[in-house]
Image: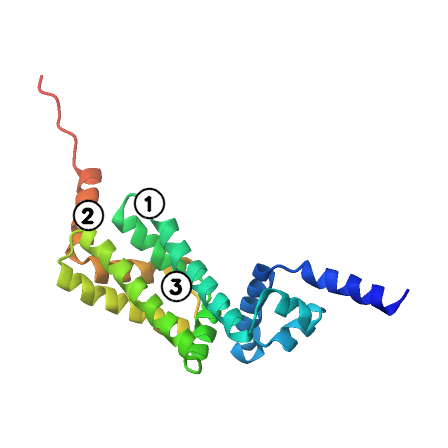
């Protein structure tokens, strides 16, 4: 087969990779190896394609990095918030959020923060994400009846707890996760959570009135 035809076929194969394919693969590579591996030649070699496929979709590396960072913002923050909004109960939203945050590994979170230390664009997005997450936690607390100023303080404490768990690379399951979530909900909701639990418990234990004869 003539080399020109071989090249055309190879280029066509490369172009079957979409821009989203490159971005998804970049996030997997970021989690495994860190931001240093997010280079066109490195990723192309791992995918078994030419760099031409990369430049078919991205004008330059900075544009690609921006796409990777933005996609991470969507999957690690906006998609999670959208999922939580399906729950009617504010306390249930907080419960689901905490279980997801402390019950799953956060390696990509760690890698992204390391990248932000070296990349101004990543740092700006990370700051935006931190503000967005804290604001959402604060919103849950306020809607559950916590005073706004107190809700802001408690939201910050909950978020710091999450970041500490992420950096420790710990993942909780079973009874330990249940205990941590219960304590964090008390920190966040305070007396609101206590009243809710006490009211529910009282309803369950309240003796039935005997009918008078």
Dot 2 crowding, Cα within 10 Å, few <14, some 14–19, many 20+:
few
Which residue occupies the foreground of this view, 154 or 182?
Answer: 154
Is 129 displayed left or right of 59 in the figure?
Answer: left
Q: Position of residue 102 (x, y in %)?
A: 39, 63
Residue 37 visible in the displayed image: yes
Which residue occupies the foreground of this view, 21 or 186?
Answer: 21
Q: Are marks 1 and 2 in contact (CB under 8 Å)?
A: no
Give the residue furthest to the bottom: 118
Q: CA distance from mark 1 to mark 2?
A: 17 Å
Q: Position of residue 50 (x, y in %)?
A: 71, 71
Residue 175 visible in the displayed image: no
Q: Position of residue 169 (x, y in %)?
A: 44, 73
Q: Which residue is mark 2?
A: 196
Q: Residue at x 63, y 69 (%)?
A: 54
Q: Say which label, 1 or 2, has the lower sequence index.
A: 1
Q: Residue at x 54, y 72 (%)?
A: 30
- Which one is closest to the eye, mark 3 or mark 2? 3
In the rendered image, which quarter is residue 6 located in? bottom right
In the rendered image, which quarter is residue 61 located in? bottom right
Secondary structure under badge 1? loop
Dot 3 crowding, Cα within 10 Å, few <14, some 14–19, many 20+:
many
Q: Which residue is mark 3?
A: 102
Dot 1 crowding, Cα within 10 Å, few <14, some 14–19, many 20+:
few
Is 66 displayed left or right of 128 in the figure?
Answer: right
Q: Which residue is mark 1?
A: 87
Q: Are marks 3 and 1 in contact (CB under 8 Å)?
A: no
In the rendered image, which quarter is residue 2 located in? bottom right
């Amino acid at each position: 087969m003539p080399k020109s035809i071989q090249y055309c076929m190879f280029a066509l194969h490369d172009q079957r990779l979409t821009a989203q394919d490159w971005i998804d693969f970049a996030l997997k590579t970021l989690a495994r190896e860190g931001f240093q591996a997010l280079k066109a030649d490195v990723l192309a070699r791992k995918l078994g394609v030419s760099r031409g496929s990369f430049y078919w979709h991205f004008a330059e590396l900075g544009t690609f990095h921006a796409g990777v960072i933005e996609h991470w913002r969507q999957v690690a923050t906006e998609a999670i918030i959208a999922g939580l909004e399906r729950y009617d109960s504010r306390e249930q939203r907080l419960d689901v959020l905490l279980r997801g945050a402390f019950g799953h590994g956060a390696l990509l979170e760690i890698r992204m923060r390391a990248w932000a230390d070296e990349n101004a664009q990543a740092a700006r997005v990370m700051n935006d994400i931190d503000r967005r997450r804290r604001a959402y936690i604060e919103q849950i607390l306020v809607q559950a009846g916590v005073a706004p100023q107190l809700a802001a303080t408690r939201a910050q404490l909950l978020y710091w707890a999450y970041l500490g768990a992420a950096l420790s690379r710990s993942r909780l399951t079973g009874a330990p996760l249940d205990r941590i979530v219960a304590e964090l909900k008390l920190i966040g909701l305070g007396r609101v959570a206590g009243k809710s639990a006490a009211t529910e418990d009282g309803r369950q234990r309240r003796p039935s009135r005997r009918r008078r004869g």
